[in-house]
Image (cartoon, helix red, strand yellow):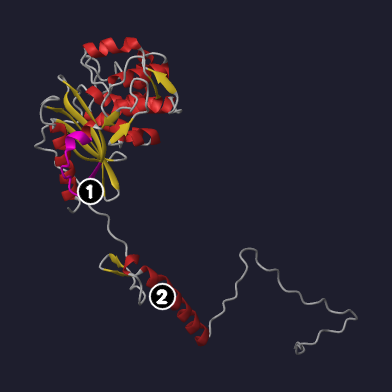
Amino acid sequence: MDPPRTNRPAVSGKRPAPHRRPPRRQGRPRRRVRRDTPLQAFCRFAGTFVLSLLVLIPLGLAVGGRLLPAAPPAGAAAADTPTPSPAPVTVDLSGLNSPHAILICRGGEVLGSRDADAVLYPASLTKIMTVLLAAESLPDLDAPVTLEDDIFPPLWQANASLAGFAAGETVPVRDLLYGALLPSGAECSVTLACCAAGDEQTFVQRMNQRAAALGMQDTHFCNATGLQAPAHVSTVRDIALLLDAALDNETFRQVFTARQYTTAATDAHPDGILLQSSMFAALDGESTGRAVLLGGKTGYTSEAGQCLASLAELDGQEYILVTAGAPGDHSTAPLHVQDAVTVYTRLSDACGG
């Protein structure tokens, strides 16, 4: 019979080997899972709930798929509430005397148009480009310029409109700019072109280069005056683009929006020449509602009919209207100006009277 076992080691004269733990298994370390006490669990839940409220309250509550804004604090101004954007304004251009018309906000938004891309003769609306390029090329507005004798016979033969300067008269650049736009003086346009580029045809090349740069795709100029030429063409849309760009030039804008101007005294004109805007002269005080006419350039040839490019302001916004092809001539009623009165009155009504 075997003797009973005991937990004591047998005496052998040697100390027993120290007890070693078995090697830990390779792999992910064991994680100790701590369980929250009931108090800790409650605090964790309460913190999450409060944080959710802090996020949801400013954003508003989602109800029925729509996000409702949070109630404004007591005493908050009503102006803090976003105002919806107004619906775009459109203006009816039917019933005008002019078969071609376009109305835009400055910057390009079209509010109404009528056969705006038809290729036509722009007549003296051409001078918008002439004066813009001259203002850019001749920054010294007080520089003296002489109107050469040889420019007058072709203009007389074509029955071109003239500002009234004499052959050989020397005047400042400024006077020529006003003379070209207000009474549509052809002698001023030709003289500005020659002064800016050396001769009119070189200047015309610059006119066409600028037209291309502005995106005037259906425009081609043959002269600086707008006198009739088969290839001298544009559209009311292109002219609107041109006027919008020209108005960014401070000198051009100042001249374009003038009602009248008196030139400097010369030997030929000791008291100067009183130049008046042909558009304002034809307006004759007619009302355009709340819209205010700021300036305009008229044009006429028998082939082009009565044309007008004008600028108006309403409620702090500026608008450009270009019309072309109205029947009549210099001796008849200014139907192009009447069309401007009609359109700007409709615009005023469309914007709330």
Q: Position of residue 77 (x, y in %)?
A: 34, 70
- Asked if residue 332 is positioned above or below residue 286 in the image, the reply reads above
Residue name at image x 23 percent, y 14 percent: 229
Name the disc covering residue 88, or none: 1
Q: CA distance from mark 1 to mark 2?
A: 40 Å
* One can see residue 248 in this view: yes
Residue name at image x 15 percent, y 42 percent: 286
| Residue situated in front as seen by the camera: 207 or 216 | 207
Residue at which label 2 appears: 53
Q: Determine the secondary structure under disc 2.
A: helix
Q: Determine the secondary structure under disc 1.
A: loop
Residue name at image x 45 percent, y 74 percent: 51
Residue name at image x 21 percent, y 16 percent: 228
Determine which quarter of the picture holds residue 255.
top left
* One can see residue 217 in this view: no
Q: Position of residue 123 (x, y in %)?
A: 22, 22
> Which contiguous range is marked in magenta?
280-293
Q: Please state which amino acid type lies under the numbered disc 1.
A: Pro
Give the residue at the far right of this rendering. Answer: 13
Horizontal side, residue 287 vs residue 213: left or right? left
